[in-house]
Image (cartoon, rainbow, N blue to C red):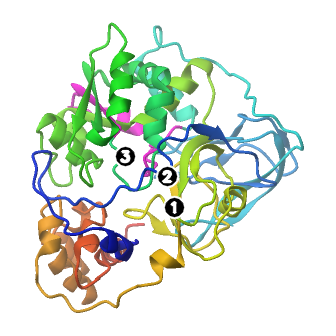
Amino acid sequence: MTAQWFRQMAGHFVHRDPSFAHGVHPPMSKEQTRGLAIRQFPFAPVMNIPLAQHIGEAAVPVVREGQEVERGQLLAEPGGFVSVAMHAPASGLIQRIGLMPSIAGKMVTGIYLKPFPGSTQEVSSGTPCDLDSATADEIITAIQRAGIVGLGGAAFPTHVKLKVPAGHSVDTLILNGVECEPYLTTDYRVMLEQRHDIFTGIGYLLKATGARRAIIGIEANKQDAATALRAALPRGHHVSVELLEVKYPQGAEKLLIKALLNRDVPSGGLPADVQAVVVNVATAAEVGRLLPLGRGIQERVITIAGPAIKKPGNYRIPVGTPLRFALDYVGVEKDLSQVFLGGPMMGAALPSLDIPITKGTSGFVAFTERETGGRRRESPCIRCAYCVDACPLFLNPSQLGLLARNEQYETMVEKFHLMDCFECGACSYVCPSHIPLVQYFRAAKVMAKKRRGKP
């Protein structure tokens, strides 16, 4: 996380306003791409398609090495209920099925697809899911078969989120159009350019969940997107557009529910516990774009930005495009220093440029030595409580950091609610001692799960 660069630009950080308690105000830095329309990205010479691009079980291949496939053709079936299908991002030849690098730094199983020379962007249609005649379960199955996951970054299978648990009901569908991560303008452009797809998707989502109304939540720095959506509101649906305070991490679903509905999701609970479901606006757009045609997701919109990028923009890019190819296409400055997948606050620095763009990739941001060269050394905690004042979940990051350094992982989980942390990075951002708190917490979660015998 480029906290050092943000500190150079920001004064002090923590504000108090009515949306949700605590939080921070990093510079948004969205001017570079917010005015750039979505453009189509070309095919890479070889597409690397991981079979696990989502939370849950990996997809199971239904193709073989040496097989020719068409763009949009099914490549892999869901490996279980918490899993989704995979589709060909281009027409071409299955070179091999084997290991490939991932953002986690480990090798994962995937499909290497070599596009045919001159392969077009056309996608053949399948069996449509008719909104008027389909049942809720049929819509949920169609979303799973289309391979749709949360496109805001988490990549949680959308159909699982829509399957309301027994004993629960949902009265409100929330569309997350906040996009509070600095630099990223993916959702913003989708709201401006794919309004019809969003509202079509909302129709499917309302029917799948049984919700009576939908609210599109947008931060006030995207007033034009809110105006455009309000102008296109369909008749017959109970859909509203609400403007929210500009504050990070407003887009976290628990905080968004609090801001829009004033309902508190319990610790360890789900939005359905307070009769809500939250879906990213780009995810809703894909539902509305794909289901009427019976297609699967084979590409997504991402933002490519940052001081090191020569041709920044918002691109519709095929899933499986290697990052190295994408960087070569947009061009980078000679003093490229770091690339963050997702964004500078919640994103991760890349272990390799050979990893591919996946369904969960909302963008990547590249920095030069100018922004990352002046790193400061980590110092001991001075008990200033800035991190406590910033944490939107009222955790104690300072105490959690000390426990992490002493490997007291069980105490972190049982007494200090480590698993409630969604790694927004607000604590690291405000820390004057430059302690990488969120990195400590990520590692602590992994160790705690291992000690409990969980994957």
> Identity of the amino acid at label 2?
Gln
Provide residue 91's location: percent of width, then percent of height: 81, 39
- Where, by quadrant of the figure, is residue 235 drawn? top left
Q: Residues within 10 Å of mark 1 (few under 14, many from 20)?
A: many
Q: Is residue 14 visible?
A: yes
Front disc: 3 or 2: 2
- Where, by quadrant of the figure, is residue 204 drawn? top left
How far is mark 3 from mark 1, CA to CA? 16 Å
Mark 2: secondary structure: loop
Mark drawn on residue 439: none
Which residue lies at the image location 66% right of the left edge and 61% below the top edge? 327
Q: Is residue 161 magenta?
A: yes
First in sequence: mark 3 vs mark 2: 2
Query: Mark 1 near mark 2, Cβ–Cβ under 8 Å?
Result: yes
How far is mark 1 from mark 2, CA to CA? 8 Å
Q: Which residues are magenta?
A: 148-177
Q: Residues within 10 Å of mark 2 (few under 14, many from 20)?
A: some
